[in-house]
Amino acid sequence: MIGERDWSDFQTFQQSRDYEVTDVEAYTDLARELRAAVTGEVRFDEYAQVLYATDGSIYRARPAGVVIPRDIADVQETVKLAAKHDVPVLPRGAGSSLAGQAVGPGCVVIDFSKYMNDILAFDTEGRRVTVQPGVVQDHLDGYLATEGLKFAPDPASANRATIGGGIGNNSTGAHSVRYGITDAYTEELQVVLADGSVIHTRDVVLDSDEWDAIVEKDDREAHLYETVRALVEDNAEEIERRYPKLKRSVSGYNLHKVIFERDGERVINLSKLLVGSEGTLGVVVEATLSLVTVPEETALVLFAFDDLIDAMVAVPDALDFGASAVELMDDEVFRMARESSEYAQYVEQIPDGAEATLMLEFDSELHDDFEKAISAASEHFLRDGGESERGKAFAAIEAYEDADQADIWKLRKAAIPLLMSLEGDPKPYPFIEDASVPPEELATYVQAFEDVLADHGTSAAYFAHAGSGTLHIRPILNLKQGQGIETMRSITDAITDLVLEHHGSFSGEHGDGLARTEWNPKMYGPDLWAAFKEVKSAFDPDWRLNPGKVVFRDDDPADMRKNLRYGEAYSSIEPTTTLDFEDDGGFAHLVELCNGCGTCRQIGSGTMCPTYRASRDEAETTRGRANMLRAAISGDLPEDELYSERFQTEILDLCVGCKGCKNDCPTGVDLAKLKAEVKHQYHEREGLTVRDRLFANIDTAARLGSALAPISNWASEVPGARNVMERVAGLAPERELPRFTRHTLTRWMNDRTALVSEHEATHRVLLFPDTYTNYVTPEIGKAAVRVLEAAGVHVRLATDVKPSGRAAYSMGMLDVARERAEHNVSALAPRVGDGWSVVCLEPADAVMFQDEYGDLLSGPDVATVGASVYEVMEFLDVHRIDELLPLRVGERAEGETGAQPAMVDGGTLGSLTYHGHCNQKALNRDHHAVGVLRRVGYDVDPLDSGCCGMAGSFGYEEEHYDLSKAIGRILFDQVDASPGDTVVAPGASCRTQLGDHSGQRPPHPIEKVAEALVG
Ligand SMILES: Cc1cc2nc3c(=O)[nH]c(=O)nc-3n(C[C@H](O)[C@H](O)[C@H](O)COP(=O)(O)OP(=O)(O)OC[C@H]3O[C@@H](n4cnc5c(N)ncnc54)[C@H](O)[C@@H]3O)c2cc1C
Ligand code: SF4
Ligand code: SF4
């Protein structure tokens, strides 16, 4: 296998998890037989049902259970046993589908994403790759990029979407104008059929020897080939008449593509029919794909129009300029982006008055002179000057640099997340969001679309793949109300009429699923609809593979209003909370913000979600946790399940509270906050364990340990004493306990006089003595004082403060956290009011003041104090303190500020690998350290790393040690791959995790700044 990685820690963690789970009664026999037959995982309990009940769509229905296969034999056994028990089967990848095709009521879900995700063979010369269906497209492309190749279809969800799912949906993306869609690149498949047999689909020349050999066998495979050929030939005229002539049309079965001409011969390839069949015809277990070369360079031009329809009018001409993508954004997208802290910076470049923009991308394989191509387009599209020139753009923005292009793409891709984070119950839902029409009909189509929406009293944003005629239009509706649901159907009815009038397709991208299958007879007419049903019966005689998608039985008609995630009957409790959820629209609203998009399954960048990265379990995604919380507050799980021990152990305790989702989840589902609230309520009911108390009050233990040091340190090494601690407190025996010092930071600060007096100081700072720095690593605090004083800062210890409450908060002991927050805010508010800043060495503490205190307390002082608290590197950067430092690396010219000082002998102070703290990343405050370290003279390689896996007490807890280590392994690999000589990390937990691995405690960045000082 190609691209294998070391999963040993993760496997140990899995084996160590020995949950007692009970299969749902109706499926106990099936589950038992499956367990005996397959080597993969088998889960038929209620939790598994909830976890796999949704995808990225508006639908929800509990499956029977899930099998997570390890090999083809597992898949065959699953399909056979499901048939024996008359239970339907649903193959699944990331479950990011938007039309409900990955939701299957009563199905056995086969989840390919966890184990069957290998790249099996790569033929660089023939430009083909063979993969298992669970491989994530971005991982595949990352692998292929080493040879300058890629799989051409590029769905926006490629960072978690699997190739199997892409084949199921016939996926495509912004570059379909240039490359077409998945069916064009799917050459061969290994497919498990409904009876468990396997066929190999590939090009077969009709009436050739190969064809004869297949059909002569008179078996199931022969029947398939003959049925499909007869259906295509018998319906040739209707196929020609009914299938839209579009770059992308993914509704129905691909009868128009399964037989084609090649070098004068007629060829049948059943792969082309299986692509887009949404798992309804067979289960793909291997795929051979053709590849394209990656263009070396691209350039963009963005034309701004003062009218949406004008932009639409321009689309057909845009295609004449050889663009590889032609993408639309409208003013609604810009408006929302302006209001978003994350995206506002990207919208600044959009000219005032732009009602819509068309973005044209050019690539170096089609154009050798970008400036020439762009100026030709600009000459055509830009007005000569007259205001009233219809159909012309009034401004153009050109982007040649990668970073500038990336900013424009970021804005374009922000559209869906921005829309979905809309507050309140009315939301822009996907149900006709990817209908396609020929580009030359877009303008009249959009005009009529707007009328339909106005008639139904709603509106929508318009954006996406204008070049291929596919616009993402999501009407804003409340699907918790019967009226909203009926409006959804009525809009769909009207829009499907409109699409047909404009020679389009009901789905140009996201497939049929539960949303569109109902409408396929309208699109294809009675003859092709009958042909679809015959195809289905030939492949799946008992209609057991993902039933109700693409085709439906006459006695069980599809209805887009069934199996809705919300629906009229949906209601959720709004628990009385200790934390303030007002800004989140309430506890339930924050939970319901999860729309199932699956971004929390991406593992390539960002922070979210470390536990999934290590375990590859749906239960350990942010989505899994949000789905479980939603089920618990809406009656889908038994009353009080939320407070059951199982819910804590399996669902909440494995969230390390890194806050990654708060920032990385496109809609801002803040699981760390939700977890803290539920854990708090759980503790109120069930009380606290010895370990909970120990960690939440770690400062008391540390104070005692420090007072008794070094005896306390020896005691922790003595086997008997150590055993008692492990047994009573449930500590992992593998972890070294912190070694306390009597020479605390507090004592050192109290014994010295500040070197910079208050009146001559540039800034006045109160140093926050966090527990770890104070009792374990006071040298970090000393380094900070040295740096700050070297820059003329007056530094005092913040006295009369308590620990920030971070540990208590993370463990859901909110009363303790609140009491500390109250104390600290009232102690610090007067000083802050006098202009003092508060500086923390530990990022988690700084973030506690900056963020969580706002959820724990109300009143103006909270925000005022929060705004004056900084992590030390943040303080240096925000106030440019480093520019005042006497540095070893070079002398600044007189009056010089801001620039990096000259290097000594052309070199630097050394190279560092920087691992930031996930809590700071959640607030976008993690970049400060890198800037400072570079300016004081280091080469810095900032890792795109997530949580270290230690997460306060988590990594010390016996039952979480293996998972903690598995998460850490991802970071260790990144550190090993980094060119930096020394790894630095501001977080105490991160330094412990890294130190436990390498045997050497990494420095805090402030220590490296101190080393950069002269003298
Ligand atoms: C924010 C967002 C943006 C998106 N953007 C795009 C886009 O630009 N273009 C696009 O095309 N789609 C897009 N999608 C939809 C979806 O992400 C893609 O279609 C994606 O390729 C589906 O992959 P998946 O692994 O999630 O498949 P899943 O959702 O798990 O499955 C998709 C279908 O394939 C079937 N299937 C899965 N595995 C197999 C198998 N082994 N054998 C047979 N059938 C199988 C399933 O039964 C299901 O019917 C987007 C979704 C979201 C949430
Ligand atoms: S938690 Fe966020 S990223 Fe994950 S599926 Fe839900 S909305 Fe998407
Ligand atoms: S807080 Fe971290 S571990 Fe918990 S769900 Fe969010 S990203 Fe995952």
Image: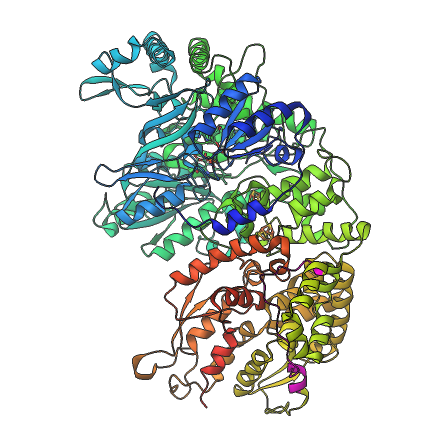
- What residue do we see at 34% from left, 46% from top? 143
Residue 383 seen in the figure: no
> In the image, residue 975 lies at what x, y percent?
43, 62
Of 681 and 333, the residue lying toward us = 681
Magenta segment includes 120: no
Magenta region, residue range = 729-749
Of 377 and 689, the residue lying toward us = 689
Of 298 and 913, the residue lying toward us = 913
Looking at this rendering, what residue extends furthest in the front direction?
720
- What residue do we see at 27% from left, 22% from top? 203
Up the image or down, 278 lies above or below 329; here it is above
Of 69 and 135, the residue lying toward us = 69
Answer with left or right where residue 947 lies relative to residue 200.
Answer: right
> In the image, residue 387 lies at what x, y percent?
40, 46
Q: Main secondary structure of the magenta part?
A: loop
Up the image or down, 684 lies above or below 226; here it is below
Up the image or down, 547 lies above or below 914; here it is above
